């Protein structure tokens, strides 16, 4: 399996391919806006891309990591399996029972 960073970068690339208008907007950002924030243009662009990615995840009712999985999975079934696996790990780390976690996050038990 790929490293999380590799999967996320692949997801960002696929996200940009899906939204060419966003790519065009990011490619024409004002360098002065980056400078005003004390960032390089590349840092400023990356920040805007991550904001757009997170906004799209929220619009879809997903966490950003779920959108990453969705954009990198080979099938809807693979996405669901990976998604549930991560949610189970999070529930375990949080010390919550699976049923309680599912109820909190609107997941099918």
Image (tube, rainbow, N blue to C red):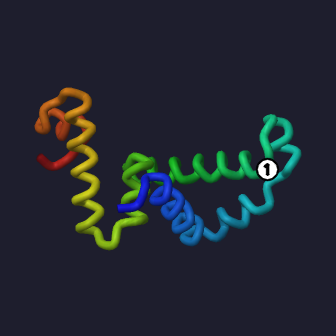
Helix, strand or loop for disc 1: helix
State the residue at coordinates (45%, 59%).
7
State whether residue 31 is above or below residue 13: above
In the rendered structure, the answer to whether residue 44 lies left or right of residue 77 reads right
Instruction: Determine crowd level at label 1: few under 14, some 14-19, many 20+ residues with C-alpha closer than 10 A.
Output: some
Above-or-below relation of 38 to 17: above
Q: Name, please, the residue furthest toward the right.
A: 32
**92 left or right of 70 in image:** left
Count of labels shown? 1
Image coords of residue 66 (percent x, y): 37, 52
Residue lying farthest top?
A: 95
What residue lies at 20% left-to-right and 46% top-to-bottom? 107
Rendering quarter of residue 26: bottom right
Image quarter of the N terminus: bottom left
In the figure, is residue 29 to the left or right of 69?
A: right
Q: Give percent across and percent down for residue 45.
A: 71, 52
Q: How far across and how far down the image is residue 18, in percent? A: 54, 70
Residue 59 vs 102, above or below: the answer is below
- Kindly identify the residue that appears in the image at 66 percent across and 50 percent down: 46
Say which residue appears at 64% left-offset and 70% top-offset: 20
Q: Is 72 located above or below residue 63 in the figure? A: below
In this figure, which residue is indicated by the disc labeled 1? 41
Q: Position of residue 54 (x, y in %)?
A: 51, 48
**Left/right of residue 54 with respect to residue 49 in the rendered view:** left
């Amino acid at each position: 399996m790929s490293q999380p960073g590799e999967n996320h970068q692949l997801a960002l690339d696929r996200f940009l391919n899906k939204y060419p208008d966003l790519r065009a907007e990011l490619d024409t950002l004002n360098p002065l806006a980056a400078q005003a924030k004390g960032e390089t243009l590349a840092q400023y662009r990356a920040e805007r891309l991550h904001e757009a990615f997170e906004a799209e995840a929220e619009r879809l009712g997903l966490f950003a990591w779920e959108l990453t999985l969705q954009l990198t999975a080979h099938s809807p079934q693979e996405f669901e399996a990976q998604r549930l696996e991560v949610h189970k790990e999070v529930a375990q780390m949080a010390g919550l029972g699976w049923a309680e976690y599912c109820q909190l996050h609107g997941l099918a038990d």
